[in-house]
Image (cartoon, rainbow, N blue to C red):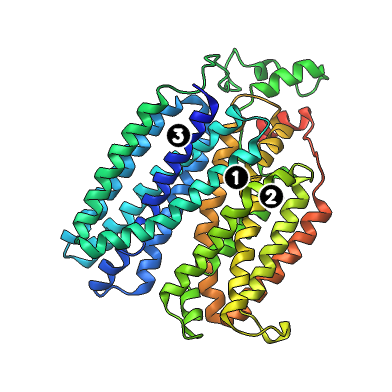
Amino acid sequence: MKKNYFLFIICLFLLLDMTSFSFLAPILPDLILSREINLSVIGLIFSFYPVSYFIFSLYLGKNLHLFEKRQLLIKCQILLVLAHILFGLLDLITSKSLLIFLSIFSRLVQGTAIGGACSILYAYVPDLFPRDQEETFAIIEMSVGAGVSIGPVLGGMFYSYLNYESSFFIIAGIYAIFSWIFIALMKHDVEKDQLDLSPTSPSSPSSPLSSYDMSKSNSALEMDHIVEHLEMKYSVIFRNRNFFMTFFVYCISYSSITLIQPTFLDHIHSFGYDSDTVGLLFALADLAYALTSIGLIKVFKYFKRKHLFIFGGALTALSLLLLGPEDFTYLPKDITVISVGMVFFGLSQVFYNATIIPEFIELLNDIYGNRRGINEMGSGIYNSGLALSEFIGPLLGGILADLFGFSRGLTIYAIFLGFYLIIYGLFIRRPIKDTREKLIENNFEL
């Protein structure tokens, strides 16, 4: 199968999945509010999506190489269709407690399905385009952004012309049909390597670890062979300073986008604008990302990723300051300045979204060497970081707004982000490779 053709299918899949993810945004809250359930419960229901997304992405990051990706993708798509059917059935529930419970359960199913699908689809890229990963991820992220933007519009249209149940049942049918078509177009899994390189248990007689004596010196070749068979462990990976600091810089930068989600509407209302303006401002950020991503990615190859992350984080911090803005900035508090801030938001994400998975993979290679399962692990960790940011951002945004107000809360977060970027720039060093002896010792201890 031609690589570009396969990439096209991946983009269509992600467009479909992200559309289904954001489809319920204008529909589900209306149902819950109509049952006299308060806003805090809506926030709780929505927060369970990234929880299951996070957990399943971590699981697949470690174990995806043990599955046939195409078959697992089919199961994830079936699960997502069932999630939409469950959402549609919620209107039939009369009990408030049962409605809340089933809403949470439906979100957990949705998060598991989309987390699995995204982990699988992202994991294909390093195998297909090992030399053009940044450009490929930039194209893919455009599909993701388009899906997130289309979903609420499509959901609003369906809800306006149909009732609640019909909206979800019809989108479930549409999703099932297109998923079947895309799966059929994939034909077969892109990976044909049938060599069994699955991790071997340290206690197994066939494991090289069983013959490793920590008290004796071992040749580099022998230790490389042992490391190749080590089980990849998150406890070992996140003890690597470079990996932990890079993961954290990605999470706190991406969290800044979700940070404003629960409070941005109220802030815009203070300027005399309605919810349509909020939608246009978020669309402006998506447009800035889409229009600049491919061009910027071609320039990124001339810079170290560390410097790209720092610049992207600084641009994110600047955008947070513009969304207020506070008096010390001497900027006018009007919609023009806020619009510029949203444009910077979109631009800043180009520096992360297309480069973070290749960086994770490279860091994992520093730890474990170039072995089977590294690409899947990098994809899974990326998706888990995405989910963690989507969970922490709105929660922290609401707390900061309650304690300090919208503008001051964003300023505090921007200062924290800038401070961490300085620490990241000073202490990150490439590469920090765990010695083979230390890595093997860590796997025995952990």
Q: Is residue 62 left or right of residue 49?
A: right
| Mark 3 and mark 1 residues within 8 Å of each other at the beta carbon | no
Is residue 380 or residue 276 the one in the foreground? 276
Q: Amino acid at mark 1?
A: Ala
Relative image position of residue 350 (x, y in whole percent) = 64, 52
| Circles 2 and 3 in contact, beta carbons < 8 Å | no
Q: Between marks 2 and 3, how big is the CA–CA gap?
A: 24 Å
Q: Position of residue 271 (x, y in %)?
A: 51, 85
The residue that disc 1 covers is 138
| Amino acid beneath label 2 | Leu
Circle 3 Cα neighbour tier, 10 Å, few/some/many (<14 / 14–19 / ≥20) = some
Q: Mark 2 and 1 residues: CB-CB less than 8 Å, in contact?
A: yes
Neighbor class of circle 2 (other Cα within 10 Å; few <14, some 14-19, many 20+) is some
Q: Quadrant of residue 432?
A: top right
Amino acid type, label 3: Ile
Q: Answer above or below: position of 428 versus 363.
A: below
SS state under label 1: helix
Q: Earlier in the sequence, mark 2 or mark 1?
A: 1
The residue tagged with tag 2: helix, strand or loop?
helix
- Report the residue at 45% width, 43% height from top: 14
Give the residue at mark 2: 296
Residue 263 drawn at (x, y percent): 49, 75
Q: Earlier in the sequence, mark 3 or mark 1?
A: 3
Q: How many C-alpha atoms fall within 10 Å of the one at disc 1: few (<14), some, or many (≥20)?
A: many
For disc 3, the marked residue is: 9
Q: Secondary structure at mark 3?
A: helix
Q: Earlier in the sequence, mark 2 or mark 3?
A: 3
Disc on res. 356: none
Measure the C-alpha gap from mark 2 to mark 1.
9 Å
Gap between marks 3 and 1 measured at Cα: 15 Å
| Screen quadrant of the C terminus | top right
